[in-house]
Amino acid sequence: MKTPLDKDLNEAYKAFNQDHDHLRQMLMASLPSRSKVRKQTSGIVHIRAFVGDTDMTRKITKLAVAAVIIIVVLISISQFGGSFDGASQVFASMLEEMQKIPWVHAVMEVDQSNAPIESWVSFNPSIMILKGLDGTVMYVNFSQEVRHVYSRDSNRITVSTVPDTFSHMGPKTAFEMIGFMIDTLETSGARITREKSVLDGIQVEIIHAVSDVQDVIMIRDIERNLPISAEYKALDNTPDRISGRMRFYYPEKGPSDIYAVGVPKDADIFDTRPEGSLKDLTKNIQDRFDQSFGDYIAVVLESSASREDPTDPSHPNMVLVMRRLGQLWRLDRYMAVDTSLHKDDKRKSLYEGIKDIWANPTIAKILELEDKKALIGQVLFDGKYSISCTQIRGKVHKSEWRGDASRLSTEVLPAIVWTNPFMLTMGNANEEKVIESMPVDPNHSQLIGLRVRTVAKDKNKDSGQDNQPREGTDDYWFDPARDYILVEHSSRRDVGQKGGFPFSRSVVTAVAQTSDCRWYPKIIRTEYIRLSRSGEKTRRVREKRILLDTRPTFEQGIFDESSLLE
């Protein structure tokens, strides 16, 4: 049985499908076990965050540690751990030299594929380009905050905004990558040798690392102190095992635009970037999302209705506790539902301790009731890595990812208060999203709105949960007089004949202010209308109440990984 947090961790890679329930859009999904995540997926996660769940991404994922951006093979060497007998210092100096090069061009040939993968990276200005196996091309200019993605199937270039803050979601520069690698040198395991030789008249060093499951050879130009090539071979018997070779080139100039890497000039252009007043609105909201509330402790109480009265959301369901201190961030999700109603449910819940204060709680009271046994899941950002712990049937599943996962979630406090404009237009291989201004509406006096339309690229394909098409609209209304907080969100879905939730509406019914006069929603009431296959409508209501302390005191060690579930 999947928990709400577990569902979130498994849905985020599906183009951040919008569903209001329980952290469904955290960008930490589908990662391997913790022992592999730090060592294998950093560059891959970074690419997923911008490409979506495309065929190219899935194929790249199968390459695992082989290659994604430029020196992922170097990262794969770190997978072996152990002492490099000075090699780590060599890598560090080599990668610093790579940073001084205007462009790094990498070509990866995979034995299981007839086509190569190519990538280009410039560190200043910050540009990343990826040409995939299926003809998809991604050109991201972080310095200009713009992304171009070409699909060969549709012969279309989709243009969208990429805030520069998202360029830090995973190692972007070579220096960050070597830091990522050195972090894993604590453990032992690999047999590593270093040998000097001559290749095509060039003095080189051959670094060879072998473990029980993989074999990596990297060749370094000693004089230039730059990698020339790398070769990777998987030695295990897994179905997705791969082998391949990567060659590095260092041109003075890189591709000036997406056409310079083979995209046809006659490709259609689909520009999703907002303009004019809509651009100003989204920037206003994005700035507030990025600034957040500084240091805080926030408690979100999620209430649900009963089966007997689906319109009365007064029953405890979930408790979220969020903490932020500078760059550090933590979320704990607890079960608060009455499990006594289900005799076979052995899971621990906060219900008995919280039921009597549910109507009028305080942050202090909630913190006193925190109980690891009632935890469904946790996410911690320690300044470098996001660490996820999910508890399912008494077992803890742990994974780790480079970057601050709270910046790519719709259920953290800033996203609840303002939403995240960058996430609104992130589609996937099967759908496109268009953002539009809302006309003046007498029913939303003094508010300013925007609409996001979702359109299926291929009408013959289904996507989304239970293969339901995601076509529909989302309307967002913000209050400029109250710091642009999101006061209403209506979502309409075309569910065809398959049933589902064709409509939901979240409305802020009460607001509050922090000690420094920052507005935030105090109560959010959400109504869901479900349409059955027979056309019958059912209605249910949920509620979120937010308690916020922007002058918090944190207990010692609360942001340490050792404080999480084991």
Image (cartoon, helix red, strand yellow):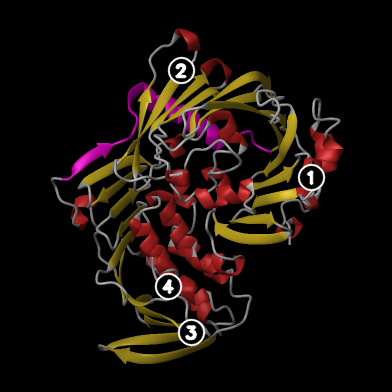
Quadrant, the C terminus:
bottom right
Above or below, comparing residue 106 to residue 83 in the picture:
above
Dot 2: element: strand
The magenta stretch is: 267-295
- State the separation of the CA atoms marked 2 and 3: 58 Å
Q: x, y (%) of residue 246?
A: 33, 74
> Is-magenta flag for residue 522?
no
- State the separation of the CA atoms marked 2 and 4: 49 Å
Amino acid type, mark 4 = Asp
What is the quadrant of residue 549 in the picture? top right
Residue at 48% x, 78% y is 90
Q: Which residue is mark 4?
A: 240
Dot 1: element: loop
Residue at 71% x, 57% y is 393
Mark positioned earlier in the residue sequence (2 or 1)? 1
Nearer the observer: mark 3 or 4; the answer is: 4
Query: Could you say which disc has been placed on residue 349 in the image?
Result: 1
